[in-house]
Amino acid sequence: MYKRILLKLSGEALSNGLDEPFCQEHLNDVSLEIATLNANKIQIGIVVGGGNLFRGKLNESLGMDRNIGDYMGMMATCMNALALSNSLKKNNVKCKILGSFPVKGIIEQFSTEMADKFLNDGYVVIYSGGTGLPYFSTDTCSTLRALETKCDAILAAKNGVDGVYSADPKKDPKAQKYEQISYQEIIEKNLQVMDLTAISLCKENKMPIIVFNMNQKGNIIKVVNGDNIGTIVK
């Protein structure tokens, strides 16, 4: 069983997959699993993407500069952090948001010392604002925060995909699932697990990644308990 984890959620995990950026049922389902782990003394840091509110493709279609679009994406992660924090607190989970850039009265400035203190005090800590710099994804932010806070593993929750495959299983019916795969294989085969910067950081620092399906209730708890679901990258 892992004792301290970094949970990477996509922004879509908070939505209904349709036109609404937020879904109360999905938010509550995620929060209840986190609440169960928190009650069992598992220390949890979370990074949420911003894809339910703003995606890079929209940035391109609007003709915006890349760096402007990236900053807009960072702001989207702040809104998602607030939504998830609110849901966690409704489920009686102590929660703090630490961001790459603070928002007075809402989001505190991230520091390793503050994150470590809150985790040790039993808070779930949500990291917002990505790395605070353009050209870096929330995958990279997840890896940095996991390394900075000395997590046991990164739990990469995917929407409707239950692990790492040789090809996109939604497009290729012959795609094969890996139960375990190395960082180097992912880099060489250019498999779309996390961006290559994040994978390279994990490889260099030997940070395990568990890729699993977020859409099945109870999977976060199963992964933390060591159940053999998803794919282990190490």
Image (cartoon, rainbow, N blue to C red):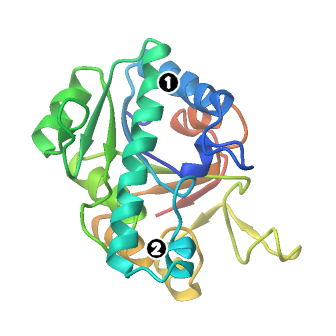
Task: Assign a secondary structure to mark 1.
Answer: helix
Q: CA distance from mark 1 to mark 2?
A: 29 Å
Q: Residue furthest top?
A: 92
Q: Position of residue 46 (x, y in %)?
A: 40, 42
Q: Position of residue 196 (x, y in %)?
A: 43, 78
Identify the residue position indicated by label 2 in the image: 195
The amino acid pointed to by label 2 is Asp
Residue at position x 81%, y 68% in the image: 170
- Residue 87 has which mark? 1
Of tags 1 and 2, the one toward the viewer is 1
Q: Residue furthest front?
A: 62
Please rate how many residues cluster around mark 1, counting C-alpha atoms within 10 Å: few if below 14, some from 14 to 19, many from 20: many
Vertical order, 205 against 38 (above or below): below
Vertical order, 72 against 8 (above or below): below
Task: Assign a secondary structure to mark 2.
Answer: loop
Q: Is residue 26 left or right of residue 201?
A: right
Residue 217: quadrant of the picture: top right
Front residue of this view, candidates 234 and 62: 62
Mark 1 in CB contact with mark 2 (< 8 angstroms) = no
The amino acid pointed to by label 1 is Ser
Residue 179: quadrant of the picture: bottom right
Residue 134: quadrant of the picture: bottom left
Instruction: Mark 1 or mark 2: name the one nearer the start of the chain.
Output: 1
From where the camera sits, is residue 203 visible?
no
Q: Position of residue 131 (x, y in %)?
A: 27, 61
Front residue of this view, candidates 227 and 33: 33
Q: Is residue 81 left or right of residue 53?
A: left
Vertical order, 80 against 134 (above or below): above
Q: Position of residue 185 (x, y in %)?
A: 54, 80
Residue at position x 14%, y 35% in the image: 114
Please rate how many residues cluster around mark 2, counting C-alpha atoms within 10 Å: few if below 14, some from 14 to 19, many from 20: some
